[in-house]
Image (cartoon, rainbow, N blue to C red):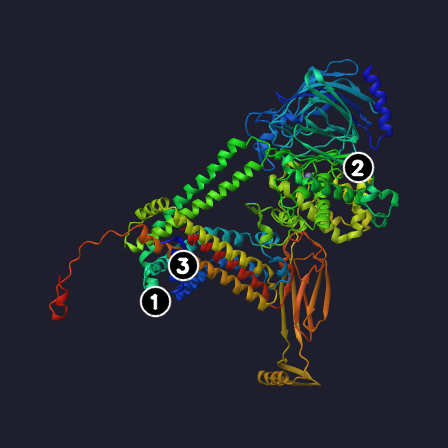
Amino acid sequence: MRFLLLSLLTWSVALAGLSKHIASYDIQATLNHKTHTITGNETLTWVNDSPDTVSTLQFHLYMNAFRNTKSTFFTESGGQLRGDQFKGDEWGWIEVKKMRLASGADVTKAIRFIHPDDNNAEDRTVIEVALPQAVKPGETIQVAIDFETKMPMVFARTGFRKDFYLVGQWFPKIGVWETAGFRYSTQGAWNCHQFHANSEFFANFGRYDVQLTVPSEMVIGATGEQTKRVENVSNKTTTYGFHQEDVTDFAWTVQPNYIRVERMFEAAKETTAKEIAYEAKLGGVPEEDVRLSDVKMIVLMQPEHAEQIERTFHATRAALKHFGLWYGRYPYKTITVVDPPYGAGGAGGMEYPTFITAGTSWKLPPGSRGLEEVTVHEFGHQFWMQLVATNEFEESPMDEGLNTYSTTLIMDKVYGGIGQLPITLFGMNVWDWLHLPGISDLSLDRAAFLMSPADDDLLRKSWQYYDSQSYGVNSYMRMGVTLDTLERIVGHDTMARLMRTYHTRYRFRHPTARDFAKVASEVSGQNLDWFFNQFFFGNRLLDYRIGEVTSEQRRTPMGRFEKGGTFQITTRKDARKADDANDENKAFRKEYLGTVKIQRHGDAVAPVEIVIRFKDGSVEKRQWDGEYRWVKYTFVRSSEIESVDIDPAKKYRLDVSFANNSWVSKYQVEVSTHWSANVLFWLQNLMLILTSVA
Amino acid sequence: MTITQAISNAARRANGRKRMIVLYWFTQMMVAALAALPLLGIAVPMLAHSGWAPELLKQFDVTFITEAMQARPGVGGAAFSAYPLIIFLTMTSGVFLAGGAVKLMVQDATVYSPREFWSGCGEYFWRFFRLMLYSLLLYAIANALAGSVKKVADKMWGDGLESAPMVMAGWVSNALLILLCGLVSTAMDYAKVRLVRDESRKSLRACLGSIWLVLRNPRVMGAWLILAVFWVLFTMLYQPVANNIPAVKMPLILVLALWQQLYILARVWLRFVSWGTAAELDPELRPAPLPPEEFVPVLSTGATEDYAI
Ligand SMILES: [Zn+2]
């Protein structure tokens, strides 16, 4: 009865929603704070949206990653992730107690663990269930699952610490059926990867109706809009209801001493008519499409970070505004920003639909914008991961990298970069005091990219990178720098249109990197295969450099010359004499033979622009296809070469050395002296410290 | 003698040996220049003729550092692996120079000659070097003690959901570390003075004795504190001015370099005052044992007969 009703409801919702509701969940769950256990039952409504007949179902049991040290997650991570370490004995797991179909069939016994990625028989993060009756194309199946989840000590995104809980990846979650032609699929199959150390998630869109019963003293935050709150006086618990459509996941948090603050993002106040008009024109879309909608912002802050609540709201508003204006309005009614407590840093900096976790430190100086950066970044995942739901298992740069690119644009635009590193001495801001320059996000991305510029393909399955550093550099910064380079190649306006087109076309869908490349070529009207093949789908290293620059004054030629039928010999002595006379003669126009050699030092080939400046102010430009290992240009001019620049517009942020892209004839004595003086000074100080201690 | 008297006497001693301060500063700068070579050897050839130099050679430019490491992995690696050796050399050179400096600061007469200075450097080198090795152990102990504050704090509040107590415990631990390092450093000043004054070769005894001396006379730490305040004051004077010198063109770069070296000179002076203070206070805190009765030869010339005992 309940099944039938829900089924009807789902169909109507699926038609009315913004996305295709493939996987929808109705969940009731109760948190037992004493045992750190969540007991729940869910009803999954799954639509076979493919032309295939599906005879099994596959589910993620993510929480089993924390079951023991033999899980794939643990063997890959060694119990360490994102700077955090698993300590103690609070393991985490999930057990499916019972699984029934709407037909009444109990399929609990048909559950078996599978290990599609690595054959690790000890890994229990994916199950497969053989169905008594296959699901035909277009059919809907409902599965009722009773489950129990034991929360681990928080270390990798999810878990608890004392009375703080961040509950993510906590319920049995169905995989994604990929029919032939969907993403990279050549035949219908489940895409249901094991939980890996360096991997996030992938899921279909759907509707989530979740009822959570928690101790009454807890302050709660969750994906979606709160629909209900009922006090259960008898056992001092409260039941909350949350509802959200068109999302791919559901996460929640509780802690008694959160400071909960609500603010409205009022679209009309946050944006000006001029901004709307500008973005509409830039994107080639009606102004109506650019206009934003109101959003309720909810911040759950630790009491000791109370003074940073305003900063959190400021960053959230900046993100809502710019992501909205650039790519399309944020379509949900709420956004919840969670500040995890001390010791639960592993739960920070994570994204879930309409629900993100940031993180900060006590008395973070205003000049250090780590809080803003993480807030903007995690919010950005609402666009790159949630709305455009790429496969994070298989193409992590498509969410992290696109988001790094977007975050950098916002941070540099709104805050002028990440600012200072939070180096304080007894609370004093050392960065400020030493007058160190602020750090732009862009240069920070490039610095990180240079740590591993071409050691891996940019795009790989996230557990197949060389190591976790390579996963990080490629997923975030290298993709960021790659897109930054693309922007400089196609131009700012085209890039803006490209990103908007890609976003709107694939909103509520599951595109791949190939789709992005197609949109890029389409929107720019250029064949960008050379770029994408080398830098997106390859591992080429880009480095053009100045090989040699010389300017030689031309001297009087010597030897035997024919002149009017007779032969004349110019001797060395004559030539020298003539040269001396010329040198004395102020009216004599000197001539120089200038030679410029440019080398291709990397294995990437890209068209390069070369600008040669002469001391008399004249300028020569050359366009080189960059194919052969080197190219040579010669000039006969009345003046010497003053400077040579490869890629003067600095388009190729992927070039691993900027220093060798430029040559100036004048020795940079100022810079060298300044730097040498500084280095000397710091070393002298160091020596004095050593002398006074020894 | 009060602490302030001791310091002002020490300052007078230092001021009376200006040429030594300059010599010390210059020698030390030369060693620093040597140590700077690997760094300059990477940066300057890469950038001396590059238009990117102004942008890439800002202070601590992260992009340039990673770029340099990427461009020259071998050279960068070699330079960085050279640094432990360089630190050892600079430390040793500091020990060497201290020999001459302490010797001349202990002498009451304000005589100074480079010969005296350098002979002091050689004379005391091994004693001071051994002293340095012992002091490393003491610093390790200081570090462990300060670290234990953090450990205790972690036991008490580490399980909590608030970082503030831990951050403050970190401050306490840092303050304790600085204080303990100051204590060891002060004791090493006294140990050096003792080795010179007693013409002793017993470094370990001097080291332990001086620690005992400082612990018994905590007021000598007052001198350390005053000199530390001086150092902070000099730094507060130096840094804002340095921040505001627009060192882009050559003359102003030289002004900045000059200002930097003035600051270094001031720090050298402070170091001398610190040794001088120990030299002033040491005789008072540790009265020399009465010298054994000396045999005074009776001279046969009549003029001195009156003085014969
Ligand atoms: Zn991210």
Tell which subunit mark 1 falls on.
B
Q: Are marks 3 and 2 on the same chain?
A: no
Q: Is residue A538 visible?
A: no
Q: Quarter for ligand 1?
A: top right
Looking at the picture, which amino acid does disc 3 mark?
A: Ser
Q: Are marks 2 and 1 on the same chain?
A: no
Looking at the picture, which amino acid does disc 1 mark?
A: Ser
- Give the CA separation, mark 2 to mark 1: 80 Å
Q: Is residue A448 visible?
A: yes
Badge 2 residue CB within 8 Å of ligand 1: no
Mark 2 surroundings: few (<14), some (14-19) or many (≥20) residues within 10 A: some
Instruction: Name the quarter where the N terminus of chain B is drawn.
Output: bottom left
In which quadrant of the rendered view does residue B95 lie? bottom left
Q: Earlier in the sequence, mark 3 or mark 1?
A: 3
Looking at the picture, which amino acid does disc 2 mark?
A: Val
Rendered location of residue B278, percent (x, y): 36, 54
Mark 1 surroundings: few (<14), some (14-19) or many (≥20) residues within 10 A: few
Rendered location of residue B241, percent (x, y): 57, 60
- Give the CA separation, mark 3 to mark 1: 23 Å
User: Do the residues under discs 2 and 1 have CB atoms within 8 angstroms?
Assistant: no
| Residue B113: mark in rendering | 1
Front in this rendered view, residue A465 or A567? A465
Badge 1 residue CB within 8 Å of ligand 1: no
Q: Which residue carries the number 3 mark?
A: B8
Note whether A46 is above or below B146 in the view shown. above
Q: Which residue carries the number 2 mark?
A: A295
Rendered location of residue A502, percent (x, y): 80, 42
Say which of marks 3 and 2 sits in front: 3
Instruction: Name the quarter where the C terminus of chain B is drawn.
Output: bottom left
